[in-house]
Image (spheres, grey):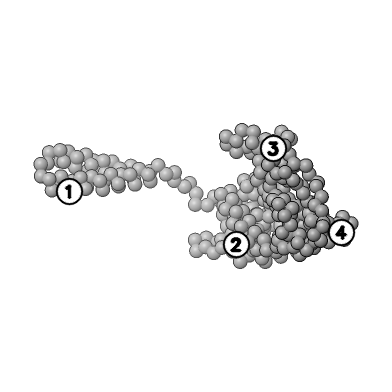
């Protein structure tokens, strides 16, 4: 505050001198000084308005406390060694699958810091997979892993991006006639259901209503949600996914409008089938939909 008061005193003195001065060159020089002082005043007031940090790092989130009490170095290690069933329950995957995923994403999520010890790549993956598997809040994850909640948010986003980067080519098939024919063959072999190229279903994912959204996300269950729609193959693997449609829409509406059924009715992916194979109508078009056919 002393610096701000000093600047104001100087500004007042220069302004008083400017009023009494008659020389043009001196007036120009004084105005230039006033502009510089106003800029300095603006910087000083902004610094005062900014809230000072009470902590660099809270004690409960310190490196020492994280090493001693966080889930990665305690509970999770114990489950890895003694209780595979609980490990699977905690992460929705077994230890072998987790290690395979970790080996894939580790180069992308490993961080180095010269200021303090960086959160390990393994802990970053623990945080992300636990968040995705449990539906816990980020605040809850923060306390469990001894990491600030804003850091948890950043870790989850970065790690999800890394997971998508390494798995998208491994998990999702390529859109080729041979791929679709292979899926149809699997349905025939496993389920004795010929000429099927996928099973469609949806899930309402509960959310807090976005601001000013009204009833757009309000579903028939009396909650606000977004829709997850997916097509899976004969072995329960996702082959197409769409997430984010407003919860007020029904499953039938989403089936007709989210997935581009023209890809199948126009036959670009099914060219290896006999040309006389008929498309079986499974879902009737909804009155509000622009589509005139819906096929699978």
Q: CA distance from mark 3 to mark 4?
A: 34 Å
The residue tagged 2 is: 109
For label 2, the SS is helix
Badge 1 local density, few (<14 within 10 Å), some, or many (20+)?
Answer: few
The residue tagged 3 is: 288
Q: Residue furthest left?
A: 22
Q: CA distance from mark 2 to mark 3?
A: 45 Å
The residue tagged 4 is: 188
Viewer-proximal residue among 237 and 117: 237
Residue 220 place in picture, x, y as percent:
73, 34
Badge 3 local density, few (<14 within 10 Å), some, or many (20+)?
Answer: few
For label 3, the SS is loop
Q: CA distance from mark 1 to mark 2?
A: 55 Å
Q: Quadrant of the N terminus?
A: top left
Mark 1 or mark 4, earlier in chain: 1
Q: CA distance from mark 1 to mark 3?
A: 71 Å
């Amino acid at each position: 505050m002393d610096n701000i008061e000093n600047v104001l005193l100087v500004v007042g003195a220069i302004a008083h001198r400017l009023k009494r001065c008659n020389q043009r060159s001196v007036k120009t020089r004084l105005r230039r000084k006033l502009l510089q002082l106003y800029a300095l005043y603006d910087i000083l007031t902004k610094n005062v308005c900014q809230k000072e940090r009470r902590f660099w790092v809270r004690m409960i989130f310190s490196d020492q406390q994280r090493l001693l009490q966080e889930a990665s170095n305690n509970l999770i290690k114990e489950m890895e060694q003694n209780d595979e069933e609980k490990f699977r329950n905690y992460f929705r995957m077994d230890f072998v699958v987790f290690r395979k995923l970790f080996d894939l994403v580790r180069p992308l999520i490993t961080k180095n810091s010269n200021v303090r010890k960086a959160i390990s790549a393994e802990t970053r993956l623990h945080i992300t997979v636990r968040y995705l598997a449990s539906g816990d809040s980020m605040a809850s994850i923060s306390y469990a892993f001894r990491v600030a909640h804003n850091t948890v948010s950043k870790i989850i986003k970065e790690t999800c991006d890394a997971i998508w980067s390494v798995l998208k080519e491994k998990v999702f098939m390529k859109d080729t006639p041979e791929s679709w024919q292979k899926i149809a063959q699997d349905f025939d072999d496993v389920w004795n259901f010929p000429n099927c190229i996928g099973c469609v279903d949806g899930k309402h994912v509960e959310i807090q209503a976005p601001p000013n959204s009204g009833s757009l996300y309000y579903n028939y269950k009396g909650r606000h949600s977004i829709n997850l729609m997916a097509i899976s193959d004969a072995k329960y693997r996702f082959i197409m996914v769409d997430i984010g449609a407003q919860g007020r829409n029904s499953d039938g509406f989403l089936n007709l409008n989210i997935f581009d059924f023209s890809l199948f009715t126009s036959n670009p992916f099914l060219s290896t089938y006999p040309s006389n194979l008929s498309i079986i109508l499974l879902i009737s078009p909804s009155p509000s939909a622009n589509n005139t056919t819906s096929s699978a």
